[in-house]
């Protein structure tokens, strides 16, 4: 007897987002979390434009945007500034807010949709057969659970990944990262303050409530054991040497010291087991990509798993999760690794040459837009499944006349420029947008990407054939 259709392991932002997506599609989902209490640390703090668009597609963006600080201008490298207003999006920004706020919104949504969240449940064993996955769960009440599918969203040290036998190859960076949450009596004028020097780099991130996250990569402290607490004097000294000032830093309420890594799972799927978020990829925090990439993994995987549970998934659909998201993970690792090398690397000729090339690239509007698209996620596109597909296939769908509000029930949306007498199609919403640029008809996936498009209005039978290639014979969604 299955405990659930899908078991999600890990109740961070990725796991909560995925569980919410599955529940929205009428899937019985259980969410297992090893911890009994929420952690009192927040490492992630940046929400990029594409993540905000996807949160808006589920009605969560306005709630998340109530608490935080929007940043519209960033400098990924000294002397290379980037104005995010060049992005074609309702959210041309990096929104700075504690991860806890995003988690709170995602958790509330999952609970409203009926997700069973079980805390103190540590996965100790995993095996799978042709019909499902069996988990051995420890804790106060050791027991066995079974589901048709399991998603490991349980972080960089993922037990699900290890038990599924999936490699996690990569490297560890050398320079320690020092974190502290502080008050500043002399806060910087910049919304996001960053400085580099011979000893490393420092960043100040405002949370908008009077607290600031102080981040330091201090080469002088590379030999300090990771178990040694970060002291007030240590953080002030790093800022004074690297930035020239400690900005009136107060005694911190919380500190942490860790080494970041650059690793990626060799596969995102093993039979009926899937990986998402930090369980699938970890990288340098420079660029603020971690939580964003994880939430976007969840949005890609959720509707596909739901289709498999409901029996409407095409044979190739589940495999498309890895073929679409694994290359994105690779790109994120390359991007953050390049930033890490240029900001923190020793001053050898290769690093200097890379920095000079990047500064030259930032002089041109086209390349600035390309880099902004990569950092923000707005530029992410997936390869077309077949040759000869429409040029829009796999692209992010623009939010034409608030089109993303039509995605809030998790269905496909067929957008047409002219009226279409299609009738009711289960699992698909038909809407009209006269301002639709480019194609005359676009089938938008639940995750806001284009599944199919046509430059001319097609008759109902041809349109239905295209829709069913992606949606099969959709079943009515149970709520």
Image (tube, rainbow, N blue to C red):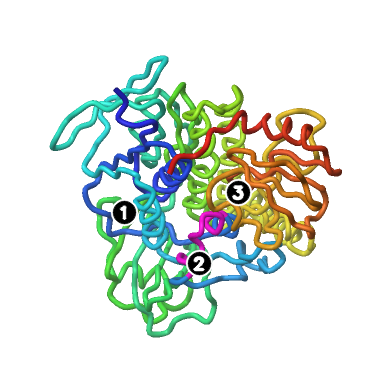
Q: Earlier in the sequence, mark 2 or mark 1?
A: 2
Above or below, 33 relative to 353: above
The picture quadrant where one finds residue 462 is top right
> What stretch of residues is rendered in magenta?
54-65
For residue 288, say whether it is visible: no
Q: Earlier in the sequence, mark 3 or mark 1?
A: 1
Left or right: residue 342 versus residue 306 is: right
Which circle, 2 or 3, is nearer the viewer? 2
Callout 2 crowding tier (Cα within 10 Å): few <14, some 14–19, many ≥20? few
- Report x, y in % for residue 396: 68, 49
Left or right: residue 196 versus residue 107 is: right
Residue 57 sits inside the magenta stretch: yes
Determine the CA span between mark 2 and mark 3: 29 Å
Above or below, 408 relative to 131: below
- Report x, y in % for residue 314: 60, 25
Give the residue pinned by disc 3.
Answer: 335
Most foreground residue, 447 or 27 = 27
Give the residue pinned by disc 2.
Answer: 62
Which circle, 3 or 1, is nearer the viewer? 3
Give the residue pinned by disc 1.
Answer: 224
Callout 1 crowding tier (Cα within 10 Å): few <14, some 14–19, many ≥20? few
């Amino acid at each position: 007897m299955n405990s659930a259709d899908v078991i999600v392991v890990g109740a961070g932002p990725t796991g909560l987002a995925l569980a919410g997506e599955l529940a929205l599609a009428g899937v019985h989902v259980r969410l297992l979390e090893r911890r009994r209490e929420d952690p009192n640390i927040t490492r992630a703090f940046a929400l990029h434009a594409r993540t905000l668009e996807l949160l808006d597609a589920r009605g969560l963006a306005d709630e998340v945007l109530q608490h935080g600080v929007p940043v519209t201008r960033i400098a990924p490298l000294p002397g290379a500034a980037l104005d995010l207003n060049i992005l074609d999006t309702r959210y041309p920004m990096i929104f700075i807010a504690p991860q806890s706020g995003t988690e709170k919104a995602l958790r509330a949504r999952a609970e409203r949709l009926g997700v069973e969240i079980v805390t103190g449940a540590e996965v100790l064993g995993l095996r799978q057969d042709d019909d499902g996955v069996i988990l051995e769960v420890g804790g106060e009440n050791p027991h066995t659970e079974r589901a048709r599918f399991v998603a490991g969203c349980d972080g960089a040290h993922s037990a699900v990944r290890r038990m599924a036998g999936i490699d996690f190859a990569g490297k560890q960076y050398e320079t320690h990262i020092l974190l502290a949450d502080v008050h500043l009596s002399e806060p910087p004028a910049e919304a996001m303050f960053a400085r580099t020097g011979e000893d490393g780099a420092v960043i100040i991130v405002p949370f908008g409530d009077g607290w600031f996250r102080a981040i330091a990569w201090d080469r002088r402290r590379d030999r300090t054991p990771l178990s040694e607490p970060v002291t007030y004097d240590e953080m002030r000294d790093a800022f004074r040497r690297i930035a020239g000032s400690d900005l009136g830093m107060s005694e911190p309420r919380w500190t942490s010291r860790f080494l970041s890594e650059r690793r990626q799972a060799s596969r995102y799927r093993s039979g009926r087991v899937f990986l998402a978020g930090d369980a699938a990829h970890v990288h340098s925090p420079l660029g603020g990509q971690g939580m964003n990439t994880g939430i976007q993994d969840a949005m890609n995987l959720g509707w596909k798993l739901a289709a498999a549970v409901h029996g409407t998934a095409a044979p190739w659909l589940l495999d498309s999760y890895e073929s679409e998201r694994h290359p994105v993970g690779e790109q994120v690792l390359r991007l953050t690794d390049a930033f890490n090398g240029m900001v923190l690397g020793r001053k050898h000729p290769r690093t200097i040459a890379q920095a000079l090339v990047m500064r030259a690239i930032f002089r041109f509007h086209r390349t600035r837009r390309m880099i902004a698209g990569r950092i923000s996620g707005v530029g992410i596109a997936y390869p077309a499944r077949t040759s000869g597909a429409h040029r829009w296939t796999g692209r992010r769908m623009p939010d034409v006349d608030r089109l993303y509000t039509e995605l809030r029930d998790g269905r496909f949306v067929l957008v047409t420029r002219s009226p279409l007498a299609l009738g009711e199609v289960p699992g698909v919403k038909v809407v009209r947008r006269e301002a639709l640029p480019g194609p005359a008809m676009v089938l938008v996936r639940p995750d806001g990407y284009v599944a199919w498009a046509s430059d001319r209005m097609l008759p109902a039978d041809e349109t239905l054939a295209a829709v069913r290639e992606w949606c099969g014979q959709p079943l009515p969604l149970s709520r």
